[in-house]
Image (tube, rainbow, N blue to C red):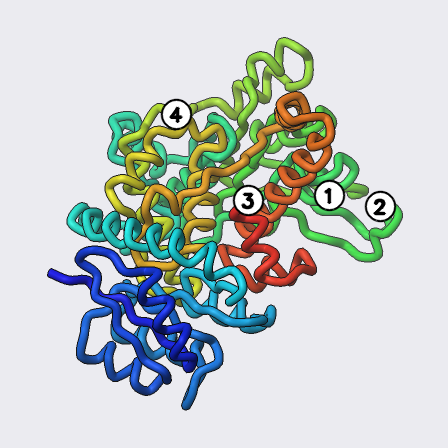
Amino acid sequence: MDRHLLLVDPDHDYLDWAAKHLEAPGIRILKCDNAEKALQVTQKVEVQIIIADLNLQPFDGIDLLKQTRGNSADTIFILTAAFPSASQIIQATQQGAHDILKKESLIFELRPLVENAWQTIDSRKSAQSSIKPSNASTLPNNTIIGKSKAFQDLFKIVGKVARTDAPILITGESGTGKEVVAKSIHSHSPRRQNELVAINCGAIPENLLESELFGHEKGSFTGASARRAGRFEQCDQSTLFLDEIGDMPLSVQVKLLRVLQEGTYSRVGGNETLSCDVRIIAATNKDLTEEVAEGRFREDLYYRLNVVELSLPPLRERKEDIPLLAEFFLQKITKKNGMARIHLSAEAEEKLKLQPWPGNVRELENTITRACALADSNLLLPEDISLSRNIKNKKATIGAINTLVASAPSDQAEQSVLDWVNATIAEQTLLQHNGNLAQAAQALNIKTVELQSLLSS
């Protein structure tokens, strides 16, 4: 069965040249000199590839792209123009154009691009049969997702401890989902009618953390212009999630210990003894036994917090959960951004399962967010999965930069490092804006097309 490629351009000489230039066995090339005729063709014939000029009549190439995408989202659309403007490139990309080529470069770039497009179409066709139905999109955000034995065992423990008030310590590498587990415990507890309150102990300066937790009296320190309730007051009868508990200063640890032992505390600068009924869930990516041995964490507090310990395995140790997590993130991201449903091919799924994921579930979400933002079809192939440059700490960052410098020729090393840094910043900004290219570009003060270039580098 012949496949169809449609050329749309007002220049008949160009149409003849392009048709001859792109001829291949099994491919039928159709030609039109205006957008209206082209649209009529697509309504009668299944066209796999359309190559159209931006400046058409009676409507332009971008309008043709919009209307033909309505007929078939899988059609690969390539636009050509003498001098495409930044605005046209951005609009075309947002509408799903596969590429935009300058007319002057067609003699060199058109045929390789079309050959690549045919390969993409073949890959999509073979991958379509591998799509499996999933109910991941029906899961609430606070659901712990996993079918591995490690997580099935975790579900059982969560079910038992959720109904008690026992303090819980959740341990695991960064990005393993400790806060999700904490929220799930709270949502299945008798305290679920009240909102869980979360605080990152490592993100608040030492001089402010005590006030954040316990509140302060007016005039107790510079800037304390009024009495302020702390987190313990705010979540009375509820659950307080203390993330990065290993970073809590020793001075604050003493006061937290008193709350756990006696259920009482005082505001900063105050003498009044306050009581509270708060369930504590703490989390850390540090080895607290090592922190205790080094004198950075109180041993008595450690045992008070570690009544029940939940240790979350890294993603590399539960690879069978990766497809389910990826599908969940796909549906979450596309729904949030009003995008059409996107699926993951079996080949792309295998690529995800082969990765070490040093950033764990958070890195996987980053990768899926980026893939959705750059997708030009509703099916992700292996080549659509651009792996993250996740850097876990300063030492790793320095090591990565040193590797880049050492591996690049001396005259290229500086540019290699700069490219790497720019791409990493672009990826993290896109993740912070939930895959919204326009918002991420605005935050970076660059054009959307520039952001796309950074992400694909």
Element at badge 3?
loop
Local crowd size for mark 4, using a 10 Å CA cut-off: few (<14), some (14–19), many (≥20): some
- Precedes in sequence: disc 2 or disc 4: 2
Residue occupied by mark 4:
313
State which mark lies toward you, 2 or 1: 1
Q: Where is residue 251 shown, x and y percent of the image?
A: 74, 27
The amino acid pointed to by label 2 is: Ser
Q: Which mark is residue 220?
A: 2
Q: Is residue 42 above or below residue 194?
A: below
Element at badge 2?
loop
Distance of label 1 from label 3 (alpha carbons): 45 Å
Q: Where is residue 114 shown, x and y percent of the image?
A: 35, 56
Local crowd size for mark 2, using a 10 Å CA cut-off: few (<14), some (14–19), many (≥20): some
Horizontally, residue 288 falls left or right of residue 127, namely right
Q: Is residue 300 above or below residue 267?
A: above
The amino acid pointed to by label 3 is: Ser
Distance of label 1 from label 4 (alpha carbons): 34 Å
Q: Is residue 437 above or below residue 36?
A: above
Residue occupied by mark 3:
457
- Precedes in sequence: disc 4 or disc 3: 4
Is disc 4 in contact with disc 3, using a CB cutoff of under 8 Å?
Answer: no
Of the pair 79 and 434, the residue shown nearer to us = 79
The amino acid pointed to by label 4 is: Pro
Distance of label 2 from label 4 (alpha carbons): 43 Å
The amino acid pointed to by label 1 is: Ser
Is disc 2 in contact with disc 1, using a CB cutoff of under 8 Å?
Answer: yes
Residue occupied by mark 1:
211
Element at badge 1?
helix
